[in-house]
Image: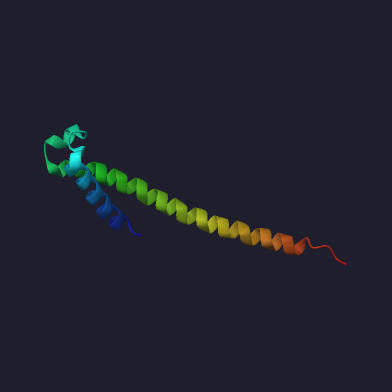
């Protein structure tokens, strides 16, 4: 998932949050509805970073599993 897809989803989520009661929680949003953009950008950066880290962790776990399998194959005792 690309960053702009995450940003669009974050904008939509923050907009829904603001419209359905979060408006009073985000006090500085009272000036303009455009002020939902900064929290959405921050949220998008966080989500995108976690998604990228999850991809890296998956790749590293696969590599560790391959190395463990190779190590297990080389450690078999000879009969």
- Which residue is outermost to the bottom? 79
Q: Quadrant of the C terminus?
A: bottom right
* Relative depth, front residue between 62 and 22: 22
Q: With 51 as the anchor, is 71 left or right in this view?
A: right
Quadrant housing residue 31:
top left
- Which residue is outermost to the left? 31
Q: With 32 as the anchor, is 10 left or right in this view?
A: right
Q: Residue at x 63, y 62 (%)?
A: 66
Q: Residue at x 33, y 47 (%)?
A: 45
Q: Residue at x 51, y 53 (%)?
A: 57
- Which residue is outermost to the front? 20
| Residue 40 screen position, x and y as percent | 25, 45
| Residue 48 screen position, x and y as percent | 36, 51
**How many labels were placed on the picture?**
0
| Residue 36 screen position, x and y as percent | 19, 43
Where 62 falls versus 45 (above or below)? below
Q: With 71 as the anchor, is 57 left or right in this view?
A: left
């Amino acid at each position: 998932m690309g960053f702009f897809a995450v940003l669009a989803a974050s904008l939509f989520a923050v907009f829904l949050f603001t419209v359905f009661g979060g408006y009073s929680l985000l006090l500085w949003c009272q000036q303009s509805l455009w002020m939902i953009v900064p929290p959405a950008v921050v949220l998008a950066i966080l989500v995108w970073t976690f998604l990228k880290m999850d991809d890296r962790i998956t790749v590293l776990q696969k590599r560790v599993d391959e190395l463990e399998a190779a190590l297990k194959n080389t450690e078999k005792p000879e009969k």
